[in-house]
């Protein structure tokens, strides 16, 4: 049942990303951002106090991460984009570790990658299931 709910929520999130418009303030990614934040917090098993401290740091990180991806768009900038994201992660890792501890602070980025991978897989499955 949990797996079914996870798949349904990921389907919902992926459909939102397809409808997102880039002309609003956050590039149309507020719902994806919120789902990613929720996903990471659940898997890190954050307390309410940790969640309250984690969310503003994560929102700042997400905003900068999206900006980095948009600024370095295109296949010719792939290495540059990867380097910029790595630099961003190095800058935010101590901030996350300060809020949730060293071990869980480092896991944030692994969980972000896992969330994105699962979203891509759901989108791929949706495209393949269309007639």
Image: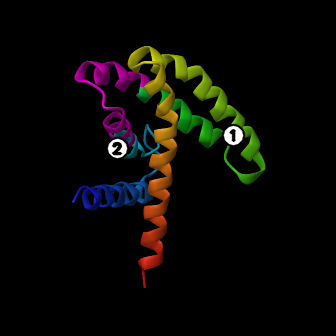
Horizontal and vertical percent position of residue 6: 30, 55
Distance from the alpha carbon under mark 2 to that under mark 1? 23 Å
Q: Is residue 112 above or below residue 5?
A: above
Horizontal and vertical percent position of residue 100: 39, 20
Residue at 44%, 51% in the rendered image: 21
Q: Is residue 11 above or below residue 57?
A: below
Q: Would you say residue 22 is visible in this rendering?
A: no
- In primary-sequence order, the first of circles 2 and 1 is 2
Residue at 25%, 57% in the rendered image: 5
Residue at 42%, 78% in the rendered image: 129
Q: Counting other residues with Cα less than 10 Å from the Cα at mark 2, is it few (<14), some (14-19), or many (20 or more)?
A: some
| Secondary element at image label 1 | helix
C-beta proximity under 8 Å, tags 2 and 1: no
In this view, the residue farthest toward the top is 98
Please name the predominant secondary structure of the magenta segment in the image. Answer: helix
Residue 113 falls inside the magenta stretch: no
Which quarter of the figure is the N terminus placed in? Answer: bottom left
Q: Would you say residue 2 is visible in this rendering?
A: yes
Residue at 58%, 28% in the rendered image: 89
Q: Which mark is residue 35?
A: 2
Q: Which mark is residue 130?
A: none
111 sits left or right of 76 in the view: left
Residue 53 falls inside the magenta stretch: yes
Q: Is residue 71 above or below residue 19?
A: above
Horizontal and vertical percent position of residue 39: 35, 41
Horizontal and vertical percent position of residue 24: 43, 42
Count of labels in the image:
2
**Magenta span:** 35-57
Nearest the camera: 125 or 104? 104
Q: Which residue is mark 1?
A: 81
């Amino acid at each position: 049942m949990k797996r079914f709910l996870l798949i349904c929520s990921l389907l919902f999130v992926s459909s939102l990303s397809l409808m997102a418009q880039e002309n609003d303030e956050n590039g149309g990614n507020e719902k994806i951002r919120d789902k990613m934040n929720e996903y990471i917090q659940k898997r890190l098993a954050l307390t309410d106090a940790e969640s309250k401290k984690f969310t503003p740091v994560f929102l700042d990180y997400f905003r900068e991460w999206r900006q980095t991806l948009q600024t370095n768009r295109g296949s010719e900038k792939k290495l540059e984009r990867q380097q910029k994201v790595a630099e961003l992660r190095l800058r935010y890792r101590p901030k996350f570790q300060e809020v949730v501890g060293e071990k869980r602070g480092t896991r944030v980025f692994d969980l972000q990658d896992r969330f994105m991978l699962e979203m891509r897989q759901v989108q791929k499955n949706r495209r393949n299931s269309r007639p």
